[in-house]
Image (cartoon, rainbow, N blue to C red):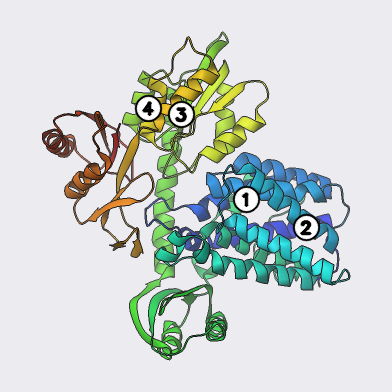
Amino acid sequence: MSTNTIDASMCARMFLAGAKNLESKKEWINELNVFPVPDGDTGTNMTLTIMSAAKEVAALEELSMDTFAKAVSSGSLRGARGNSGVILSQLLRGFTKVIRSEKEINTAVLAASFQKAVETAYKAVMKPKEGTILTVAKGAADRAVELLEENPDIEMEALITDVIARAEEVLEKTPEMLPVLKEAGVVDSGGQGLVQVLKGAFDAYLGRETDYELDLQAGSGSAASVASAKAEPVEADIRFGYCTEFIIMLEKEYTHETELDFKAFLESIGDSIVVVSDDGIVKVHVHTNDPGLAIQRALTYGSLTSMKIDNMREEHHEKVIREAERQAAETASAEESRQETQAAPAELKETGFISVSIGEGIADIFRDLGVDYLIEGGQTMNPSTEDMLNAIEKVNAKNIFILPNNKNIILAANQARDLTEDKNIIVVPTKTVPQGITAVINFVPEKSPEENATVMEEEIARVKTGQLTYAVRDTHIDDKTIQAGDIMGVGDHSILAVGKDILPVAEETVALMVDEETELISIYYGEDISEDEASVLRDKIEEKYPECDVELNYGGQPIYYYIISAE
């Protein structure tokens, strides 16, 4: 039974239940990523971040509000992966700043904690963007304050219920704040992840926890309990077996009240519900055991198109096998990388380099350029802040440059910088591998770290990057209709080209990158491309752009057939 205050024990149970609910929805949240690339990983990054904190909580031998707060803050900060994970860690950090000095949390403390969480997260992002997880968090926090102002004696259950309702309301509006979300027909994935954490925590507060709960007693940080925190839900735990998606072409009046009624019906037959309406169409996603019921109700509003029904239990079985194979491969790769990485020099040197790398060939290029430590990661698995801190510890230098080489890793690198006190860490905001290579090439030992950082940032701004991969789902974005399996040329800010075959898409991508100032075109071919295939592309590029130098390099990167730069 819920009470009007939350003690440390209840707080821990709520946190772990929130983490579990996020973990159980991570694949669905991954699917909400705007770009239909195979590395859409918001759900995964947020889950790994919160599970890092969950392990810290589970390992506590003495549970108090102070020890709980420290475990959550430290675990999430060090385990943060990707921009969404870093923002989540900052929300948790701000929240725990307020509660750590309390014995119990009442409604006033809870509202203050929400406010501090939002304040801390906004400060951590250089250019906060509305329509994201930050907006959802702010909407929830502001509502908590409003409720207390309206009724200082409000019950805890009523406050949390209303706060979550406001978070969901703001989440539904994110497509109106970010045009790219509206075009793709999805809500913000990070915001959805935050809502799932709040919902799971509230379930625990109400005593509606599922069969998952980490042992908070001494010794619960064992391998067994950690494994349970990371495990995928077994097939029997999949409550609703069919992932059902379709678009309604509206033929009748469809008001806000109609949509609320439709959502209520979907909630009665399933979960993981997304309903987004715009300009005469409604995009629907629901997990249910009876897709026919959802379809029948939808037909009362209009005709249906883009229908897709997947058996999640079958998919789960296949995913378990693929995930086991992937983890085994990543473990072997990471171990090999650790063994091959240069040991820290015996004597302290002036400058060192840490770079995030993907693929054997790209790793070799960075080593040849003098990079001291490579972190395997990049697109398919974003390194954590902890990975960055471990790398910093291994490089024995006064000044260390970190090259994230991915826009989704920059915040984690910044967080590692802020947590390091004994070395001067400079994060060069490289968003792609070619930018990272350009940054290292432009390093001049005679210049100061600050001067080098300035030059590097100026030079990487001149590098355009295109990456060839495949679409994992149907969507419409950047004025392009994309079908699952299509080949895409993804540029720095948008999808440049789409087609059925790699070579013509690569040529079109390059054509949109090259301008009159381009002097060098570099091609890095991935593990799924042979040298002969790559040579054909190089020859075509050389023929079309005789005024440019064209370099061909083996990258060995997974997922991306080619990484191409123009500078």
**Cα separation between marks 2 and 3:** 44 Å
The disc labelled 3 sits on which kind of residue?
A: Glu
Disc 3 crowd rating (10 Å Cα; few below 14, some 14-19, many 20+) is some
Nearer the N terminus, badge 2 or badge 3? 2
**Cα separation between marks 3 and 1:** 27 Å
Dot 2 corresponds to which residue?
A: 11
Compared to 301, does 187 lie above or below? above
- 4 vs 2, front mark: 4
Give residue 114's quadrant in the image: bottom right
Element class at badge 3: helix
Compared to 293, does 61 lie above or below? above
> Looking at the rendered structure, which numbered label has been put on residue 437?
4
- 4 vs 3, front mark: 3
In the rendered structure, the answer to whether residue 60 lies left or right of residue 560 reads right
Dot 3 corresponds to which residue?
A: 457
**Cα separation between marks 4 and 3:** 12 Å
Q: Residue at x 70, y 71 (%)?
A: 208
The disc labelled 4 sits on which kind of residue?
A: Ile
In the rendered structure, the answer to whether residue 143 lies left or right of residue 136 reads right
**Cα separation between marks 2 and 1:** 17 Å
Nearer the N terminus, badge 4 or badge 2? 2
**Cα separation between marks 4 and 2:** 46 Å
Disc 2 crowd rating (10 Å Cα; few below 14, some 14-19, many 20+) is many
The disc labelled 2 sits on which kind of residue?
A: Cys
Element class at badge 1: helix
Dot 1 corresponds to which residue?
A: 88
Q: Residue at x 45, y 65 (%)?
A: 182
Compared to 389, does 60 lie above or below? below
